[in-house]
Amino acid sequence: MAEPDTVELSVPAEPARTRVRVWRGVTGALVAGWGAVVAVLVFAQVVAWAGGGEGPGVAELVGHVVGLVLAGAAQLVADRSDGRRAGLAGVAVALLTLAMLWLFWWS
């Protein structure tokens, strides 16, 4: 009985997948960074209240927490989706980052 010839199939590289992974990594790092910022702000507020000072302020703290929750939700969608939905969720993370920087740090 003759054995069939085996032919190896070449799989083209997928640069689009690499870009998607990088973009998800960047947006994930942004969300993680905001998580660290919120943790530092909570700590600073508690220390300020313990010492009788003002601290960063409750409005800024709440704004950062709301922004972090929204960005985290968008990142979750980006991580669990493909295609246009994932891209738009990543853009939402970037826009929320810009909004929080503008509202709480630059203005």
Image: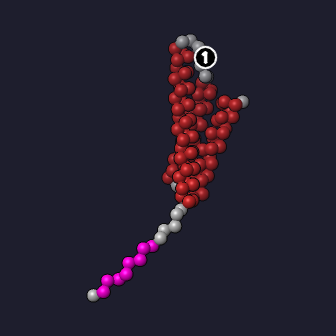
Query: Residue 89, relative to residue 45: is it above or below?
Result: below
Q: Furthest-left residue in view?
A: 1
Q: Furthest-top residue in view?
A: 52
Residue 91's spot in the image, x, y percent?
62, 48
Residue 2's spot in the image, x, y percent?
30, 86
The boundaries of the magenta stretch are 2-9
Query: Residue 1, relative to residue 97: is it above or below?
Result: below
The quarter of the image holding the N terminus is bottom left
Q: Furthest-bottom residue in view?
A: 1
Inspect this view and state whether residue 78 appears: no
Element on which disc 1 rests = loop
The quarter of the image holding the C terminus is top right
| Rendering quarter of residue 98 | top right
Rendered residue at 56%/31% (across/down) = 37
Would residue 82 be counted in the magenta stretch?
no
Residue 32's spot in the image, x, y percent?
52, 38
| Rendering quarter of residue 49 | top right
For label 1, the residue is 54
Name the residue nearer the viewer: 100 or 1.
Answer: 1
Inspect this view and state whether residue 91 appears: yes
Horizontal side of residue 11 vs 103, given as left or right: left
Query: Residue 77, relative to residue 69: is it above or below?
Result: below
Rendered residue at 64%/35% (across/down) = 100
Residue 69's spot in the image, x, y percent?
55, 38
Horizontal side of residue 98 vs 23, given as left or right: right
Amino acid, disc 1: Glu
